Image: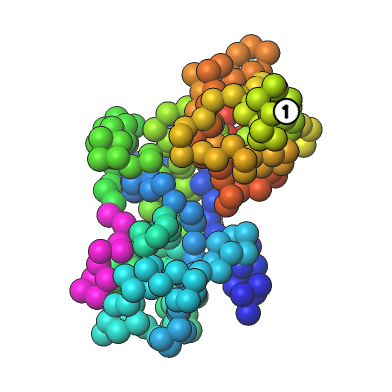
Amino acid sequence: MSQALSQFMAEKYARTVSIDLADWLELNPPPCICEPKYDGFRVFMFKSGEKILFTTRHGVIYSESSHPLLFKKIRPLKEGPTIPDRLVLDGEYKSPDQLWIFDVLQVGEEDVSGKILLDRKKLLSGILTGAAEFLLVSYTVANSFQEVIDYKITQLALKAEGVVVKNPSSVYGQKNAWLKLKKSNTVDCFVVGVERTIEMERTGIPHSWFIGLYDEGGSVVEMGKVGTYLKEVDPSKIGVGTVVEIQFQEVTADKKFRGPFIIRVREDKKMEECTFLQLPELSKK
């Protein structure tokens, strides 16, 4: 069953794109929906009666026995009078008990993914309001480029990771309908090699790595070396093939990151997702 749920999410979940806001608005003219982007892992929530499971798109299952704090917090989803017996919800999870719900795919026996986003938002609000309204991601409607930028500035001041801009008339999973705007120049890369330093020879733990991305032809492009990281990052967990999120100042003319440092290890991402498409200045070349 757990494999089937994870496969369902991997096949169905709506993807965000990372392109210039102006280019996105040409594809999706305003008005648009703007939501805060939280620093967590994407999850689907499956509810059948009183049984609830969460899954990531890479096969990790969260159950009441494995995540008791999360399930204690979401208990109203089992008991609320407005909560249907069967549900599939889309959201973001951050350990140990933070959960944000922003979309709905199924209510009862009805597949609602074909409804437009505004209608799904109304449906989701009706389900969660009163019982579990604290899980509901708030949103605003922006009518111009500047209103999107103003919303982003406001959300970053409130410590959001960034914002997601969505086409209110899009069905769930529609191509290019969701745009992710991060707070700074960040990108997910994978480690293509480890630099063997004196410190590594002494401790066995690397502290400097070569990182890469896939270009549009599927070839690996080495994007330089990174040797600094936040104190929360465990270098012993970073090896060849590990996906890491880095922050950087710019991409140089020879396709190298200037001033990169590692923000976190992305256990929820695969190498295949680390492409030039994250960087409009490269994907357009």
Relative image position of residue 97 (x, y in whole percent): 36, 62
Q: Residue 269: x and y, percent? A: 60, 48
- Depth order, front residue of 14/97: 97
Q: Nearer the viewer, residue 19 or 168?
A: 19
Indicate whether 87 appears above or below 59.
Answer: below
Relative placement, left or right, of 188 versus 49 is right
Q: Which residues are magenta?
A: 129-138
x 79%, y 33%: residue: 219
Which residue is outermost to the left? Answer: 130
Q: Which residue is mark 1?
A: 201
Asked whether residue 154 is drawn in magenta, I would say no
Element class at badge 1: helix
**In the image, is 110 to the left or to the right of 271?**
left
Q: Position of residue 38 (x, y in %)?
A: 38, 48
Look at the image and name its color scheme.
rainbow
Residue at x 62%, y 29% (from the top left corner): 207
Does the magenta segment cover residue 131? yes
- The percent coordinates of residue 132 (x first, y second) are 27, 71
Q: Quadrant of residue 91?
A: bottom left
Please report the residue visible at 48 percent of the width from the left and 54 percent of the height from the top: 41
